[in-house]
Image: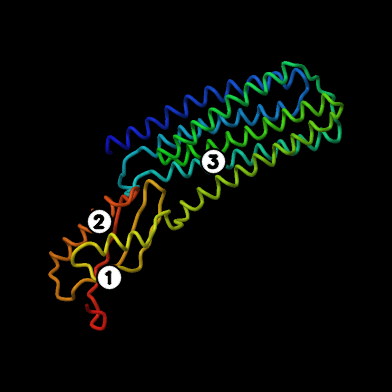
Amino acid sequence: MPTKQNNRFREIRRILVYILILNWGVAAAKIVYGIITHLNSMTADGLHSLSDGVSNIIGIIGITIASYPADKDHPYGHKKFETLFSLAISALLLLISGNLCVEGIRHLAAPEIPRITLTSFIIMLLTTAVNISVMTYEYRKGIRLKSDILVADSLHTKADIATSLSVIIALIAIKAGYPTVDAFVTLLISLFIAYSALLIFRQGAKILCDTAAVVDNDKISKVVLSVTGVKSCHKIRTRGREDDIYVDLHVQVHPHMHMNEAHRISHQIEQALKKEINGIVDVVVHMEPLERNNRI
C-alpha cells in the first residue's frame, strides 16, 4: 500500500484516540453530576457523550480494517469497511435515541424535582465548549482526509452540542419553576440523536449501494476527448467513496486502429483521468469502433 495512504489511516486513528479521551471525560462529568442531582436531561446528555466514545472505538476498528491492502478475497481493497463501520455508528445512535425516548416518557409520567446549582451550569458550559472544539476539529480533518468515519463521528458530536444547549435551556426553565421541562428536553435530545443517525445512514448507504460518485461526468468526458485518437465518449458510470472512485466508460476510435494503438490510448485515458480528477483510483475503458455514419 502506498505510504501516503498508510499515513492517512494512521492520522485518522490518532485523531479518533484523541477524541475518545475527550468524549469520555465529558461523559463522566455529565453522568456523575446528573445522577447526583437527579437531572435526567444531563444524564441523558452524558450517555450521548458516552456513545460518542463508543463510536470512536467503532471507528478505530473500522479504519484499521479499511487500511488492509487488497487481497484475493477483496481485490478492490477494504476501504468500504470504513463506510460500513460508519453505519454501525448510525445504528448505535438509533439505539440510544430509542432508550432516551422511553426514559423521557417515563419521567413525564412520574416527574422528579432535580437539584439545580451553579455547578450544573458550569459543567454544561465547559463540556459544551469542549464538544464544539472537538466537532470543528474532527469535521475539518474528516473533509481534508476524505474520511467517512471522521465526518460521521463529527455529526455525532454536533448532535451532542445541540443536546447540551437544550440541557442548558432546561436548567434555566427548571430554576424558574418548570421541572417537567427536564423530561421534554430528554425527548428532544432523542430526536436530535435519531436525526444524526439518519444523516450518517443516508451517506453510508449511498456508497455501499453504488450510487454515482460525486464527480462531474462532463469533466470526465472532456478529459477523455482530449486524448488523441478518441472520437467520442459515452456510457460513463462512476461509483465509490470520494477518495476511492471507480470509473468505467465507452470510447469510440477509428475502426481500423491496431490493437496496440487502442491499448495505448486506453492507458492514456486512465492516466489522464487520475491526474485531472482527484479520487479516481481505477478506470475501465471499453473500446468501440466508430460507426460509419458517425465518422469524422
Locate the C terminus and report the quarter of the image it occupies: bottom left
Instruction: Name the kind of residue labelled 3 in the image.
Output: Ala
Q: Residue farthest to the bottom?
A: 293
Residue 28, position in %: x, y?
63, 20
Q: Amino acid at mark 2?
A: Glu
Q: Which residue is denoted by mark 3 in the rendering?
A: 88
Q: CA distance from mark 1 to mark 2?
A: 15 Å
Name the N-terminal-most of marks 3 and 1.
3
Residue 4 in which image quadrant? top left
Residue corresponding to mark 1: 232
Q: Which residue sits at x=32%, y=51%? A: 277
What's under tag 1, amino acid-wise?
A: Ser
Q: Which mark is residue 59?
A: none
Q: Which residue is mark 2?
A: 270
Determine whether, in the image, residue 144 is placed left or right of residue 166.
Answer: left
> Relative to residue 33, is residue 149 drawn left or right?
left
Q: Secondary structure at mark 3?
A: helix
Q: Which is more N-terminal, label 3 or label 2?
A: 3
Badge nearest the viewer, 2 or 3:
2
